Amino acid sequence: MSRLNLAKRLAISIFVVAACRPSLGGSPMPTTSSIAGDLVPSRQMTVTVHVPGVTDALASSVISAVANRVIEAAGVALQIVTPFSTEEGFSVQAQLGQTDIFLATPAAALVAREAGIDVVMIAGLQRNAGLQLTVTPGDDTLVESIASGSVLIQGRPGDQAPLLQYFDDAGVDRSALEIVFQEPSVPFDATGLFDSTYAAALVSSYDGAARLQEFLDPETGLPEGPDASSVFAGINDDALASAPGLGIWALRSSLTDEDSRIAIALAVIAIADGAAFCRDDAETCAIIMEESALLDRYGVGMIWSINQLNSTFWPALEGALKIDSVELQRAIDQAAATGVIAGAPNIEEITDLQILELVEPRLPPALDLKGEDWVPLDVPLLAE
């Protein structure tokens, strides 16, 4: 696993940006947390948030939480870690005063569990994964040809489960399908799709889909734009469009320590607050992302991506942190049916409600985790 370099770790830990919405935290006194009352660990703690790949819009809730200092008063710091390889996406380096959480789809977490990493889901987060299967335009593109070719996937092992379900629903033979995972330590690279190395690419609607349009044509030096690729699946309520979204996971062992539980609960509250902040003020959220110096995209393109990410979160009619047992069971069944995992565990085996029991009574009354009134922004991806 590769941690962010020192400069970037410092940036995510200490940078402060003034936001239009008043911060719910920010008191410099390390006594009680203004966002979660008396929920304070007995010592300074760091919560390391493991994201699936290179930092993109998905990290906006964490980065905004740091900028708005929402749990700083409780003596808890947040930092982001990106995986060095797909095999090490759930690896940790134990350090005193540090605990870890993971943003991951259920299928990816289930694969990690079968590899011996005992992670449990502690909270929900994303309503759907926002997956899109993209191809280069052509009248002869058939689902059979994609299913028998090579597909580049922006995600972790396990994230191919909805794609396999899509092929199975279409009744096509996928025995010759080759899955290649994008290197997670670098931004999504669309070269392989445009030079026909891959038959298709499975990308996130909020990052990979943007990078396909922003990819520079090697001959003209201009962005490829929307006409260079097309969405083949991930619309009309198919298996990709309804793919289970990311949840928040933790190592079961980390929940045995009280300070670790408290720090994780505060991190969950902070992430929820950051997600709501970026929903309510995507423009300022994009500025915060740019000022963090952790991303390679900025400006209107980042606003577009945050807006797309918001569409995978909101509305969350049961509350964004709720663990939806129906959806989780569907994810388990899908991963097992497609052969991504060997066995299907019970929901009780892979969830732990201790963190939500700490979080729910301490959520700020003004924090809207349903987002029923959220309306997507009308924002272009490429500036005219």
Image: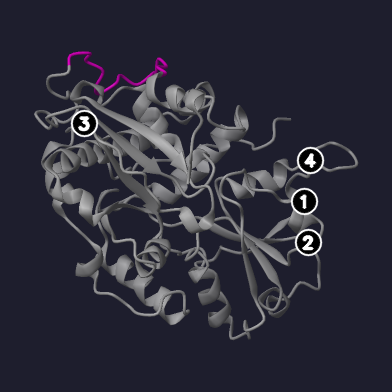
Q: Is residue 162 above or below residue 339?
A: above
Which element carries disc 4, helix, strand or loop?
loop
Sort mark 3 into few (<14), some (14-19) or many (20+) by Cα contacts within 10 Å: few
Spatial separation of the CA atoms under disc 4 and disc 1: 13 Å
Please give the range of residues in magenta. Answer: 15-29
Which residue is denoted by mark 3 in the rendering?
A: 366
The picture places residue 312, in percent across and down from the top left corner, at: 44, 50
Above or below, 266 relative to 238: above
Q: Quadrant of the C terminus?
A: top right
Q: Determine the secondary structure under disc 1.
A: helix
Compared with 65, 371 (above or below) is below
Q: Quadrant of residue 15?
A: top left
2 and 383: which is toward the camera: 2
Question: At label 3, which amino acid type do we have?
Answer: Ala
- Reading the image, the residue beneath label 1 is 227
| Place of residue 174 in the rendered image (x, y in percent of width and height, measured from the top left) | 62, 81
Q: In x, y percent, where is residue 67?
A: 38, 22
Residue visible at 28% across and 75% down in the picture: 345
Amino acid type at circle 1 is: Asp
Residue 279 in view, yes or no = no
**Residue wearing tag 2:** 137
Q: Which residue is mark 4?
A: 216
Q: Position of residue 275 (x, y in %)?
A: 36, 38
Look at the numbered discs 1 and 2 and tell me whether their residues touch, using CB distance below 8 Å: yes
Q: Earlier in the sequence, mark 1 or mark 2?
A: 2
